[in-house]
């Protein structure tokens, strides 16, 4: 009986030590958003009216916060996911999308006019061709990396898909806040990406069942 009690206590202690933690915080962006319309790649160089503005400042300030050094167990097989990048009002919604490797992304056209979604990135090169309202085409993202997405008909349309080989990332909300749940205890490098720049990695330590507050800064402040 005593041996059983000791064994049960040992298993409970081990379970407690393995409880995941939470990383949360806010992003501080020190760079000002600016139009990306003139900086995106082009396949055919088809011009378009600039009556529609580039993504608003709030969308351009979206950032993806992630563990640069993820737990070893995170690199096992990831379940296939499904995500959506809408085309509405001649904008991609959301402007920043974060997914895991193996995820299929649907690109539905919700506008009255045709769109032609493409990317020339090394991570995933594709061109979905012209298709009208009500149709959707899909792409499977099978490698980690950053994929800028554009429309070859509407030059002001742009979006970014960040593909990760682990699930420990978060896209900031309207207030710049982020939460990464389910992080196994350990020491990690935490960093962030936005189209305005990338943060210098900072070391954090996640304790079993604990919550760590870790704010991240992108850009440099004045002297």
Image: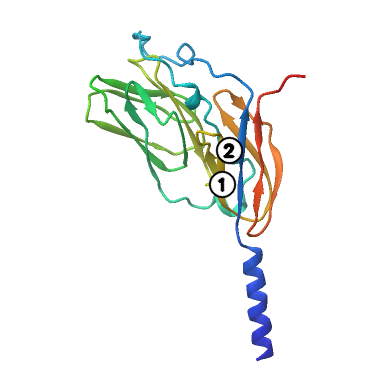
Q: Where in the figure is residue 105, as x and y percent of width and height?
A: 37, 37
Which residue is denoted by mark 2 in the rendering? 65
The answer for how far apart the CA atoms under marks 2 and 1 are is 8 Å
Choose between 147 and 180: the one closer to the eye: 180
Residue 216, by quadrant, is top right
**Residue to which mark 1 is pinned:** 180
Q: Quadrant of the N terminus?
A: bottom right
Q: Looking at this view, is 50 or 138 the one in front?
A: 50
Is residue 50 or residue 164 the one in the foreground? Answer: 50
In the picture provided, is 154 more to the left or to the right than 55?
left
Residue 32 occupies quadrant: top right
- Between 186 and 128, the one nearer to me in the picture: 186
Find residue 141 and report its horizontal and vertical position in percent.
42, 37
Q: Residue at x 62, y 51 (%)?
A: 71
User: Quick check: marks 2 and 1 in contact, CB under 8 Å?
Assistant: yes
* For residue 205, side relative to residue 95 (left or right): right
């Amino acid at each position: 009986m005593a041996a059983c009690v000791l064994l049960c206590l040992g298993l409970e202690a081990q379970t407690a030590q393995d409880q995941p933690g939470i990383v949360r915080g806010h992003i501080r962006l020190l760079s000002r958003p600016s139009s990306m319309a003139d900086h995106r790649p082009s396949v055919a160089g088809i011009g378009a009216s600039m009556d529609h503005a580039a993504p608003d400042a709030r969308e351009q300030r979206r950032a993806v916060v992630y563990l640069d050094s993820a737990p070893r167990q995170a690199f096992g097989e990831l379940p296939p996911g499904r995500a959506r990048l809408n085309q509405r009002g001649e904008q991609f919604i959301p402007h920043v999308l974060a997914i895991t490797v193996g995820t299929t992304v649907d690109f539905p056209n919700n506008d009255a006019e045709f769109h032609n979604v493409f990317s020339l990135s090394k991570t995933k090169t594709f061109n979905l061709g012209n298709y009208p309202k009500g149709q959707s085409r899909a792409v499977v993202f099978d490698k980690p990396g950053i994929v800028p997405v554009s429309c070859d008909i509407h030059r002001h349309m742009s979006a970014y898909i960040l593909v990760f080989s682990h699930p420990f990332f978060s896209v900031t909300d309207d207030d710049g806040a982020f939460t990464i749940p389910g992080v196994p205890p350990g020491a990690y490098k935490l960093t962030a990406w936005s189209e305005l720049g990338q943060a210098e990695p900072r070391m954090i330590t996640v304790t079993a069942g604990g919550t760590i507050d870790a704010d991240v800064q992108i850009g440099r402040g004045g002297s």
